[in-house]
Amino acid sequence: DLFPPAYTEKLQALQDGIEPMPFSLVESVVRQELLDGAPLSDLFLTFDKEPLGAASIAQVHKATLLDGRVVAVKLQRPNVEPKLLGDVANLKRISKALAKSLPVDYYTVFSELGDALI
C-alpha cells in the first residue's frame, strides 16, 4: 500500500521476467549450504528441478525429505546481497532528492529496508 499501482504494476512486470537459476547452480548451492558438499540424495528423496517460483533474490523448489515430508526449499541467488544493498542505496538517494514531490517519506521506508537487510 506504500506504492502507487503504476509503480507496483511496472515492478511486477519486471519480476515476472526473471529467469530461474539453472538446476546445476541450484544443486551446487544446496549441496554447499545444506549438505557440506554431499549429494542431494543424502537429504532428499526427490528434488524438483523446476522451481515453484523464481524472483530476483531467490527461488523455491519442492522437495521430499528422506522421512517423506514434502518441503519447500528456498535458496538465495548467489552474490545477490551487494546488488540488493546497492539498489537500496540508490532508492534512498532518489527518494531523498524527490522527497518534496512524493506522497510518502520513501527515504525512511528504504532506510528501514536497508537496515533489515544488514
Image (cartoon, helix red, strand yellow):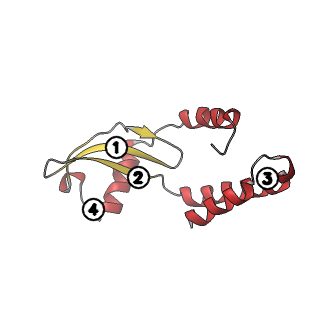
**Which residue is identified by label 3?**
94
Q: In what element is the residue under mark 1?
A: strand
Q: Amino acid at mark 4?
A: Leu
Q: CA distance from mark 3 to mark 2?
A: 30 Å
Q: Residue furthest left?
A: 67
- Badge number at residue 61: 1
Residue 1 in the image, given as x and y percentages of width and height: 62, 42
Q: CA distance from mark 3 to mark 1?
A: 35 Å
Q: Amino acid at mark 2?
A: Leu
The earlier-in-sequence mark between 3 and 1 is 1
Q: Residue at x 56, y 38 (%)?
A: 15
Task: Give yes or no for contact between labels 2 and 4 (Cβ–Cβ under 8 Å).
Answer: no
Q: CA distance from mark 4 to mark 1?
A: 16 Å
Q: Amino acid at mark 1?
A: His
Residue closest to the eye, 101 or 59 = 101
Q: In what element is the residue under mark 4?
A: loop
